[in-house]
Image: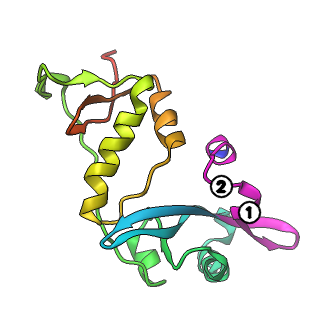
Amino acid sequence: LRQRYLHNPRFRVEEARWVGEQGGRVVASLLLIPLASYWPGGILSLSGIAGVAVHPSYRRQGWAQAMLREALPWAPAALSGLYPFQSGFYARLGYATVCQNQHFEVAPECLPRPAAWQPLLPPSLEALAEIYQRTEAPLGRGALVRKTAFWQRLLEDPSLRIPAHPDGYLMYVHHPAS
């Protein structure tokens, strides 16, 4: 996780990391990540909240809430968003569920194999980005604007498969039978 944040081209960790200290000891932290998302009427800036963590000895003492209340006024965007560990915790701070993240496990033999779908290779990552932008932007439902570096990172993952067609794609992780 540390490497993911340190080498993320969207932000510089020293500008985005917030820590809570007690007695000179870091007991809590969070990241504010500058993002953008598609909404009706256009693209809006969004501060992504990530890496909210509180040392187990300091939980249930208000550290996460205090850090969010302190950090958000400094955020460069009027909107903020996160993928919560528990919706109720963030609801107390005014957050609400906008969409549900879906996870499916499917046996490979159940997947369709249309002849027109071909694997998308790294040289055509621009096509993948174009499909995403073309299909998500008009929906205006808050999907993140993805930069080229995002697609490059995905395509470098040897376990990720991305069959694509001009009208869409499917991303999945292949787990070979053991």
What numbered label is drawn on residue 110? none
Q: Callout 2: 10 Å neighbours few (<14), some, many (20+)?
A: some
Is residue 55 or residue 99 the one in the foreground? 99
Q: Position of residue 125 (x, y in %)?
A: 42, 32
Q: Secondary structure at mark 2?
A: loop
Is residue 172 or residue 165 the one in the foreground? 165
Q: Callout 1: 10 Å neighbours few (<14), some, many (20+)?
A: few
Direction right: furthest residue: 24
- Residue at 46% in and 76% down: 90
Q: Determine whether, in the image, residue 6 is placed left or right of residue 108.
A: right
Q: Secondary structure at mark 1?
A: helix
Give the Cα distance between marks 2 and 1: 8 Å
Q: Is residue 25 magenta?
A: yes
- Residue at 45% in and 22% down: 158
Amino acid type at circle 1 is Glu
Residue identified by numbered label 1: 15
Q: Which quadrant is the N terminus positioned in?
A: top right
Q: Position of residue 73 (x, y in %)?
A: 63, 83
Residue identified by numbered label 2: 11
Q: Position of residue 9 (x, y in %)?
A: 63, 46
- Residue at 13% in and 22% down: 113
- Residue range highlighted in magenta: 3-30
Is residue 176 or residue 164 the one in the foreground? 164
Count of number-bearing discs: 2
- Residue at 45% in and 50% down: 146
Q: Which quadrant is the C terminus positioned in?
A: top left
